[in-house]
Image (tube, grey):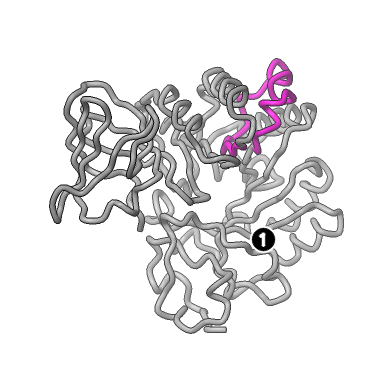
Amino acid sequence: MIPLVVAAEVRGTDAPFVVRLTATAETPDDALLRRTDPSTLVISHGRTRARIAGSDPSPFLGDIVLLDPARSTMQRLIRAGSRHNTFLVTERCDQLCVMCSQPPKKTHHDNFIHYERAALLAPKGAVLGFSGGEPTLYKRELFSLLERVHAARPDLRFHVLTNAQHFSREDIPFLSSSAGRTVQWGVPLYAADADLHDQIVGKDGAFRALLDGLAVLGQAAANVELRTVLTTMNASALPRLAHFVTRLVPFAAPWAIMQLERIGYASNRWNELFFDSSANFVPIAEAIDIARLSEVSTLLYNFPLCTVPPVYRALAPATISDWKNKFLDTCEGCSLRSSCGGFFAWHTDQAYLRLERQ
């Protein structure tokens, strides 16, 4: 795994700050990163200094980082050359999904000012993510950040993961604005049945609130990506959900069916929740076929290619973030490896039982 947070000894300031790590420090936004001894790297920015463990500065050069003296950390907000850079807006959430990969917390640390500065320093044309928790619990702060960043950096695009339960008609002016149109809203929908969806997300009335939020997004002609995490609870209901999507959310592009991530709540309930698509792809195939007949773009996220029948493999891009993916010993010599996303770093070799090298 690629570390996103690194221990750092910061001196010369008590306040957190954001800088770009470079070998030359040519602008006021740059900090000089250099090796001082075989096991230490030093970051210099004005009168501040930070020390991190390491012998080679090259993996960090170009990164935009948040240095926090109080926590003695360096957080890599935007990693140079990576397509998978996401800001964690909050760990608070108003749902309690049975398979949540990032179980919610009651505390909240407001980092909007740091995320805004980092976004302004992002590489040209970058796509930046916002996730949680539930980011729209801080909807006004998020919208304001996106408006300001768009005004200064119209080249940037954004992806926001949200349960879409906090949108209202009053949000349509922003959602349909030039800033709002730079955002793709990733929205989870787990079933066409209110009871099942609410059971999965652990919140009564969530399905109804979600439909209201999707209606607002539709009225604003917002860019919506629907996400359905596959579990034993909803696998057999996927074809019905496909019909639901084609009738009521045809503007979503894409509809992503996602394989389960073995972390967070799912790690303790893996045997109960994991649906082995390599053993039974039938409901997934049926759902895909229904959606594609209605020209609803459908993709498979987090599916190793060897678990997908050949006819559907073109729909399974490599989607696992680079900092948390791996390949198994079984993958050695596989002809599909170069185009496959592999596995989450926390999956065991026994998580998928029917893998065959291609």
Residue furthest to the right: 294
Q: Exactly how many numbered labels are in the figure?
A: 1
Corner quadrant of residue 146: top right
Task: Please state, as top left, top right, bottom left or bottom right, where the N terminus lies in the image.
Answer: bottom left
The answer to whether residue 85 is above or below residue 58 is: above
Residue identifier under label 1: 236
- Identify the residue at horizontal 45%, vertical 27% (top origin): 117
Q: Which residues are magenta?
A: 157-184
Relative placement, left or right, of 151 versus 65 is right
Estimate the x, y position of residue 305 in percent, counting from the top left.
59, 72
Nearer the observer, 279 or 173: 173
Dot 1 alpha-carbon crowd within 10 angstroms: few under 14, some 14 to 19, many 20 or more: some
- Identify the residue at horizontal 68%, vertical 58% (top origin): 299
Magenta stretch: includes residue 160:
yes
Task: Please state, as top left, top right, bottom left or bottom right, where the C terminus lies in the image.
Answer: bottom right
- Identify the residue at horizontal 61%, vertical 21% (top origin): 147
Relative placement, left or right, of 329 versus 213 is left
The answer to whether residue 256 is above or below residue 106 is: below
SS category of the residue bearing label 1: helix
The answer to whether residue 280 is above or below residue 288 is: below
Q: Amino acid at mark 1?
A: Ser
- Is residue 42 in view from this perspective? yes
Estimate the x, y position of residue 200 in percent, counting from the top left.
55, 45
- Is residue 232 in view from this perspective? no
Estimate the x, y position of residue 351 in percent, counting from the top left.
43, 69
Nearer the observer, 76 or 153: 153
